[in-house]
Amino acid sequence: MAPHSVSVSRRTLLVFTILSIIFLAQMSWWIIFHVRNSHQNRDLLINTLEQEAQLITALLNSEYDHLYRLARLAAGSGDERRLSGLTDHPAVSGAVRGTMVFPAESLYIVCPTGNDSLYLFLDRAFPKTFTDSDDHLVYIAPSGGYRSGRAILTAANITVNPAVADSLHTEHARHVRMFLMEGAFFIVLILIGTYLIYLALRRARQNRAEQNLFVHSITHELKIPITSLGLFLDTIRRRQHDPALTAELMPKMKADLNRLSGLIDNILQVRHLWDRKGRSNPQVINLSEEVKSYCRSAAERIEAAGATLKYDIEDNIRIKGNTDEIIRVWNSLLDNALKYARPEKPAIDIALAGQAGQAVLTIRDNGPGITTGEAARLFDQFARGDSEDVRRIPGSGLGLYIAREYTRRNGGRISIDNADGGGCRVTMRFNTVS
């Protein structure tokens, strides 16, 4: 990859990473702000209700204290008119002089007047006139007698309605869950988007690297046979068209031309597959006979490469497909097998068997195999193995891509893995027909 492309990719990734961090920080702040705001609103409402209860309690105690002072004046003066004025107060239910014992649930103010006392009875339901209009508060009536102006009502008598407090806590919890879920949802979206864009950037970088490798490979693949043809022609010309030399060089020149033709054909096939032109025109074929015929015709080519061929073909396996396209796949796989087989003793094994309604065809070499995790990627365009040994072997990175696309066009599946005992194994699967 060009240094400029690397720097641009890194800058893009860096900028996007910074923006993602800012988005995540903003979303986290949004969650914290709304959760804290909901918490503060709940506490504010509860505090407001508690202050309202305290205010009403203080107001009633102030009124009771005023009644106590008036009762003491009435008790000390003996003026019945003053006493009658007290009993007209809505908080007073009656008054009596004497010394007596009252039920525990009675509520009264007692003012000693010498030998007896003045008892001013209070209406236990009077404070409810202040709380009934507000369902946020609850009034619990006190009881007993009070001999001084101390507070009759306490914080335990007028309190916040527990149901209202529970509803506020429930609403607060619902808001917190809502903010957390919404925030988490958007954070997950940001993370997924970040990951997808990271994958896209990495894939774009990988594509550029593979395309650069493709250009390098294609240049190398084109240069070698062209240079070879040029040398052969110069040799023939210098030897003044020596018939023996010409007969010796012609097959080599033919091989170089076939190599060029195959490379150009692969490039044209990739363009053809990109454009999605043409149809497979599938027909029922006897795959067993086609594989046997292919192995017999390829034996000379395999032996010329110094390799050995073994094949084990099960009879009468039929599939629906296009023979020409399937043979094109086999040619591509055989080329790969010959290129990556063990150089000192190359061997190719081809097997066809029927398994659970499927035709399973395997082509195996005895080369170094593939590294872990790169099996699926090898079927991508321009993909080559990661090891240096593999990259030194001539190739355009299109063979397995073409093989996969043609296999799919014929309703099959193709995979690649390491075979037991070493080597690489390519497996093609087709549904059988009767």
Image (tube, rainbow, N blue to C red):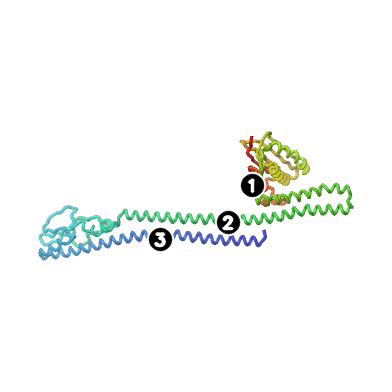
| Residue 164 left/right relative to 189 | left
The image shows a total of numbered marks equal to 3
Q: Residue 352 or 122: which is nearer the viewer?
A: 352
Q: Residues within 10 Å of mark 2 (few under 14, many from 20)?
A: some
Label number found at residue 37: 3
The reply to whether callout 2 and callout 3 are in contact (CB within 8 Å) is no
Residue 75 placement, left or right of 362: left
For label 3, the crowd category at 10 Å Cα-Cα, with few meaning under 14, some 14 to 19 and many 20 or more, is some
Instruction: Give the residue at x 12% y 64%.
Output: 82
> Where in the figure is residue 39, as x and y percent of width and height?
39, 59
Amino acid identity at mark 2: Tyr
Q: Position of residue 308 (x, y in %)?
A: 75, 40
How far is disc 1 from disc 3 in space, using C-alphas?
Answer: 53 Å
Name the residue tied to disc 1: 375
What separation in Å lies between label 2 and label 3 (alpha carbons)?
35 Å
Residue 111 found in image quarter: bottom left
Viewed as shown, does residue 3 lie left or right of 93? right
Residue 110 in sight? yes
Query: What is the distance, in whole Å, between disc 1 and disc 2 at their CAs?
Result: 22 Å
> Relative to the observer, which residue lies in front, 127 or 350?
350
Give percent across and percent down for residue 417. 65, 44
- Element under disc 1: loop
State which tag comes first along the sequence, 1 or 3: 3
- Residue underneath mark 2: 198
Along the line of sight, the residue nearer the viewer: 242 or 306:
242
Visible in this render: residue 393? no
Residue 337 lies in what quarter of the image? top right
